[in-house]
Image (spheres, rainbow, N blue to C red):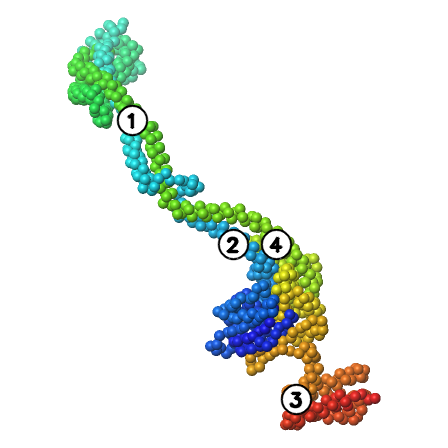
Amino acid sequence: MLKRISEIKNIGRFKNASCGTLQFGELTLIFGRNTYGKSTLGDLLSSISLNDTSDISVRRTIPFDNNPQTATISFQLDNGNEKSISIDNNSWSPALPEPLKIAVYDDGFYHNNVFTARQFTRSTKEKFSTFILGAQGVAKAKEIAEKNKKKRAITTEQTKLKKAAFSEIENLEAFLSLKPSGSKAELSEKKETKLRRYHELKKQKTNSTSIFQRNEFSPLTWFNDFVALIEEIKMCFMTSLESHHHTARRKLDEHIRINFKSSDGSEKWIREGLEQNQGENCQFCGQKLTDSTFSLFEIYRQSFDESFEKHEKTVKTELSRCGESIFKNRTNQLKVHIEKNAGVIIAFPELSENTRFTELICEVNELTKELKQYIDNWEKDNLIYQKQIGGYVLQKLKSPHVEVNATFSDSLPRLNDSIAKTVEEINIRGVELNKFIKSFKESVQSDKISESIEQVTTDGKRLAKEINRIVLSDQCDEYIKLSGQFQSLSQELPGLQAQLNDDQGSFLSSYFSKLNLHFQDFGSKEFTLEVGENRSGHMPIYYLKVKFRGKDISERELDRVFSESDRRALSLAIFWARLSEISAEEKANTIVVLDDPVTSFDNNRISAVHRSVIQLSENARQVIVLSHYEQELSRFLTTYQNNKEICLFSIAVKNGQATLCSENIEKFIKNDHEKARENIFEFIEGTNNSNAIGDLRVFFEIELGMRFAKQIRDQKINCQNLSDRIDKLATYNIIDEQVAQQCHVWREALNPSHHTWENADIEDQRNTARQFTDFIYNQLKPVA
């Protein structure tokens, strides 16, 4: 247990406190007025439990000096020996001796673990959860949280690795398990070989495609109908109209010969005239037609009957048909075709070593040369032919029924035969050329090349993967290691979480049962506390859910439902329930420090806490209570001092510096009047030199009221003035006149404005005090 605080220097009000002679007991009370340093002592002991003096370092004594903060505290071990620890570089050295522990309840516990601004907050919930679970429970939860955090970190690291090193890997699992078939140099050489082979095949495939896209020889076309058309148009020229109107025809011809200067167009003119005449008068001059004229008309009509018109129509049709075919351009398409085939002939240099193919090319070239000459001649002679035929056509159209004797040169028919024969010879060789070309194309088909390219590509990719696997071996090893860790954690975590849930489930049930018990014991009987759980973070957070008279209270309404006493009682109950949950062995090694545990408590709550402190002191290694409530400590001591060994200290301040002092319990528990009486006796006896006349005057008034309390109540004496009160006591014959006169004498003598006391020697003061006490205890009596 904590045995002694040897020294405290430059920490708060403790400028240079040396109090090593004071020995703490198993139950030690420390009284300290506000600002005297009580909280400093609490923080000092709390820093030992945390082994963190950061809160102490900010409590430097004011004014500052260059001296360091120091503190030395001794603990008594099981063997009776003492072990001291001291502040050294923001920590205690050595640490708190095993197996001792220190549990501190103070205002910081209230604000950190329970309420902030009278509300539950995320921070207080987290700290509450950590506190109730204790170090072991938190350790398990933290272990799981750390493992989950590590698992997420592994996933993040693997994602980074994938992005940085494996972004182009399609099947990462297969890549990681890939076993390279050789060294990097060997594989690189094989890959280069495959690459060269790939380009060779690719070139072959490209050429193959190009070869298949080359044109083959296309047969030439010559329209070999020219001679027949010439014969047909000749027949059309030679046709004439012969009918039973031969006499009319002869007379018409004679009439035309005699009456027309020229026969050109005469028949046409006569025919149109017949069509226009419709009466007995001439349609041109209006004269009456004679019988001879009508006879002539009859001859005309016999000459131009329906057979004539039919014959004329047939002649025109034939001339149009034959002329269109004869006059069309026959050579342009042929020449285009010749040039196209010329390109085909030179498009297959690969067949240049084929003798027959070369011979055919030569033959086609010679024949093509001849053909071109024929075409040139044709185009020249054709112009003459067209002009000649055109003249015959015009002549025939003028007199369709008259035979036209047409004669033509035989140059074009002979050229036509030559062209047709040459075209045929070229086409015969073209067919043979195409056989060679098709055979050649079939020999370079790309299917097998594509298969080879596909295989080489597959081999190349495999070699590239193996090389990449060697290059990324470190990253692969790291990824495989991370995957193993991830898998291990994935298998381990469910079991740990299930175990934690079981452990914490039973613990929380027991804890909240005790929490409700203590909360009600400390005076908040209409509340029920339940556990709430939040699993949104790394660790589950357990918090308080409050019911009042069976109704759920939202956290926003707590401020209106909880009184300050309820909040303080809840905070203390949380602390007490946690102590109730630790093992008997751990509790037997725990030093419990309570700093003002009954702040804002009314009397019934204070009594409950006092009982709990006594019960706790029976099981804990040590209980240290710090309080600034003198009356509360007196009440505790009055109740339990006879049945429990209690050590009592106080914090005294002299010249602004605090230190610990031992206190006499009997004297401490006296009321103010009793303490004033004891002080007067000690002054008279010379054991202290501190007394004031005002103290005697106050003592006199209180003692008078206490001595005659019943009589004053019965007579309803309510005088506030001491002089009037003395007179009333005499008036009601409670005291006699002589005692009343003596009371007035002392009233005046003890008046603070009386200077006799202040100017007197201290021994005279003691003598006056002695006479005063003699009057009080020997003469101040009621009337017999």
Looking at the rendered structure, the kind of residue marked 3 is Gly
Can you identify the residue that label 1 sits on? Answer: 444
Q: Nearer the viewer, mark 2 or mark 1?
A: 2
Q: Quadrant of residue 524?
A: bottom right
What's under tag 4, amino acid-wise? Answer: Gln
Q: CA distance from mark 1 to mark 3?
A: 136 Å
Report crowding for label 1: few under 14, some 14 to 19, many 20 or more residues within 10 A (C-alpha): some
Residue in the picture at 63% in, 68% down: 622
Q: Which residue is mark 2?
A: 146
Above or below — where is 574 with respect to 232?
A: below
Q: Evaluate if marks 3 and 2 touch, with contact meaning CB atoms under 8 Å apart.
A: no
* CB under 8 Å between discs 2 and 1: no
| Residue 646 picture location, percent across and down | 67, 73
Q: Position of residue 104 (x, y in %)?
A: 60, 67
Q: Are marks 1 and 3 in contact (CB under 8 Å)?
A: no
* Residue at x 79% of width, y 88% of height: 781
Q: Earlier in the sequence, mark 4 or mark 2?
A: 2
Residue position marked by numbered label 4 in the rendering: 504
Mark 4 surroundings: few (<14), some (14-19) or many (≥20) residues within 10 A: some
Q: Quadrant of the C terminus?
A: bottom right
For the residue pair 413 and 149, the one nearer the viewer reads as: 149
Tell me which numbered mark, 2 or 1, is placed earlier along the sequence. Answer: 2
Residue 564 placement: quadrant = bottom right
Q: Which residue has dot 3 on it?
A: 686
Q: Name the spot of residue 688 as percent of width and height, x first.
A: 64, 87
Most foreground residue, 571 or 633: 633
Q: CA distance from mark 1 to mark 4?
A: 80 Å
Left or right, residue 757 beside residue 237: right
Q: Nearer the viewer, mark 3 or mark 2?
A: 3
